[in-house]
Image: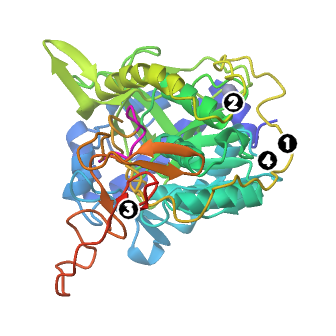
Amino acid sequence: MPYHDVETTDRAALRDRQADRLQETVDRAYENVSLYRNRFDEAGIGPGDIDSIDDVERLPFTTKEDFQEEYPDGLFAVDWDDVARVHASSGTTGTPKIVPYTDGDLQVWREVMARSLHAAGVRPDDTVQNAYGYGLFTGGMGFHDGTEALGATVVPVGGGNTARQIDLLQDLGSDVLACTPSYCLYLAEQAEERGVDPRELPLSAVVIGAEPFTDPMREEIEAALDVTAIDVYGLSELIGPGVSIECEHAQDGLHIWEDHFYPEVVDPDTGEVLPDGEAGELVLTNLTKVGLPAIRYRTGDITSLTREPCDCGRTHARMDNVTGRTDDLLIVRGVNVYASQIEAAMVDHRRVPRRLRRRSGRPRGPRRAAPHRGARGATGWRRGGRARRRRAPGDREGNARVRPAGDLTGRTPPRVYIGERGQERVCADHRPGPARGSAVHRSGQRSHRLCATLVTADTPGRGTSPRGPRRRPARPPRTPRCCRCGGSPRRSP
Ligand SMILES: [Zn+2]
């Protein structure tokens, strides 16, 4: 049973609804946003000119640059008095994009997120640990509000603080973890470092997004945590997470909630709309957003669409897993290469050393078979049951001193995971080697060598300070610590 009847509505009725909503959106944008009014005039489109949803192709595109040039509120379609909340993109590649939400927009967001989590298999009696960053980034609040709207329990941990994340997972018996895919793997590795078998964590599923990832990386996550990994997609410019998600039933493409977001795939160079099945740049149009309706927004994400009904019964269009971005494209000797393809090769390359490393004495169960799409059937991934407290000898507080490599508070991730889980499973900035430490450290039940570059405890990012220039006189350098166990060279056995 879907969360909302509209998920299985027939496509003719859906198209009628989309056309009505597009007309309202175009009228509102023309009335209230000068950029849209000027562009619609140039294109010869005015209020009342939308007869069917196919007319969307007559509308001009909106781009990231439009958001940046109209910073902060040039694209707002309502007065500030009517704005209930703002969020912003991370701004790591330029001026942040500010997006406003009216009360009604927030209600829509809660509804599509609840719908998404339900499609992913979350039910009201589940507990969701939310490890997406809270704040201007939409990930934290989006999952938080959606989980509450669904009636499930949310644990609002936010990004980072991995030792605490692991403790809470065990103590509260969370069923679902929401975080980025790279953080899933980091958390699994940190659990192992603390003597906790990540496969014994109570999780049944992880809902991963905010970064492109490949099927091999998904399989690695599912094997490492013994979970089903569900892909979720969204972006601040449209609403945040909740634009589309895979269903637990088939995991065969992400269902786009088409009654709120109209999808197209276009040729990135010409802007021509491509037929279903062909890969190109995803273009999305808000059909119901009032605060800032994004009309034909070029997402930069590479995917393809299908409008065939899913095995689960939902009729909305599905998009393929995002495999790259138009701005990640490298042309190597005339061949198009996306960063995600490099990542896929790296994951495969690392597999052999990862298996060979399993000699630390901890028995492992048989590796779970690779997920077979479409075979999950009615039983789904839910294992049920609550976690039992499990703390291995040697597990102690204070081991996890390493910052995760990814930016967990922003939408722009590290595109290539080189080094993050390199041959020796070290943190992103540190490679193994004998240069500055060949002593053996002990962390839990595992031994490892010091990495070549040592981190200094309590240093919030090398060379930077959140408080600006140093105000205090220079202190003697702190004892360098190993980036893996936090131990100092003197503590080596
Ligand atoms: Zn489905």
Residue displayed at 47% across by 73% down: 82
On the rendering, which quadrant does ligand 1 occupy? top right
**Numbered disc 1: secondary structure:** loop
- Residue beneath disc 3: 490
Looking at the rendered image, the disc whose residue lies closer to the viewer, 4 or 2, is 2
Q: Which residues are magenta?
A: 421-429
Q: Give the distance between the C-alpha atoms of the residues marked 2 and 1, in whole angstroms.
A: 22 Å
Q: Earlier in the sequence, mark 3 or mark 1?
A: 1
Front position in the image: 155 or 386: 386
**Numbered disc 2: secondary structure:** loop
- Residue beneath disc 2: 364
- Residue beneath disc 4: 123
As for residue 355 lying within the magenta part, the answer is: no
Residue displayed at 64% across by 25% down: 251
- Residue beneath disc 1: 384
Where 350 sits versus 161, above or below? above
Percent coordinates x, y for residue 97 in the rendering: 31, 57
